[in-house]
Image (cartoon, rainbow, N blue to C red):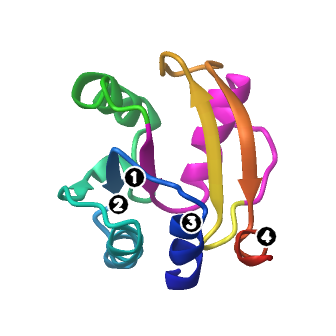
Amino acid sequence: MKRVALRLRKRGVSVDCILTSPLRRAQQSARIVARALRFKSDLVITPHLEPGGSLEALIQQLNSEFVKKRRILLVGHEPSLSSLISVLISGRTEASMVMKKGGLCRISVDTIRFGKCGTLEWLLPPSQVLAK
C-alpha cells in the first residue's frame, strides 16, 4: 500500500477528504495513503464502509457532510466497493468487476446519488499503479 500511495503522490494525486471503514486494516491503509499524499485533515471513519455497510447510507452521508468536496477517497472492503462502483456507473449492483486489494478506481460524478450518476474514469489493480 505504501508503494501504491507513493506512486499516487508522484503522479500528483491529491484528495479533499478520506473516508475509511472502521476495520483496522482499512484504517491502516487509509493512514498510509494520507501520509504519502501529505493529507493534513483527520480521516473520517464511517460504518457505511465496513463489510455489510449500507451503500444508500454512505451516499446520504457523502451528500450531507461532504457535498463541497471534489476529490473523495473511500477506503473499504470487497464486495461492497465493487457494488458501489457498479451502482454509480450502471444503476445496479450486479456489474461484474474485480477490485484487487490496494486497487484504485476513479469515478467522475456531478451529483452523487444512489443510481447511475457517474462515469468510470479508470479501474486499476496495484500492478498497474506501480507500473512505470
Tag 4 residue: 128
Q: 47 above or below 70? A: below
Tag 1 residue: 49
Q: Is residue 52 visible?
A: no
What numbered label is drawn on residue 8?
A: 3
In 3D space, how far apart are the residues under numbered discs 1 and 4 (Cα atoms)?
A: 24 Å
Q: Position of residue 48 (x, y in %)?
A: 35, 46
Q: Are marks 1 and 2 in contact (CB under 8 Å)?
A: yes
Q: Position of residue 34 (x, y in %)?
A: 34, 67
Residue at 63 percent across and 44 percent down: it is 106
Q: Secondary structure at mark 2?
A: loop
Q: 27 above or below 43? A: below
Residue at 51 percent across and 62 percent down: it is 77
Answer few, some or many: residues within 10 Å of disc 1's Cα (few below 14, many 20 plus, some between 14 and 19): many
Amino acid carrying mark 4 in the image: Gln
Amino acid carrying mark 2 in the image: Ser
Amino acid carrying mark 3 in the image: Leu
Residue at 61 percent across and 30 percent down: it is 108
> Which is more foreground, mark 1 or mark 4?
4
Reading the chain from its start, which is encountered first: label 4 or label 2? 2
Answer few, some or many: residues within 10 Å of disc 3's Cα (few below 14, many 20 plus, some between 14 and 19): some
Reading the chain from its start, which is encountered first: label 1 or label 2? 2
What numbered label is drawn on residue 82?
A: none
Q: Position of residue 11 (x, y in %)?
A: 61, 62
Q: Secondary structure at mark 3?
A: helix
Residue at 57 percent across and 51 percent down: it is 81
Q: Secondary structure at mark 4?
A: helix
Tag 2 residue: 21
Q: Which residues are magenta?
A: 71-98
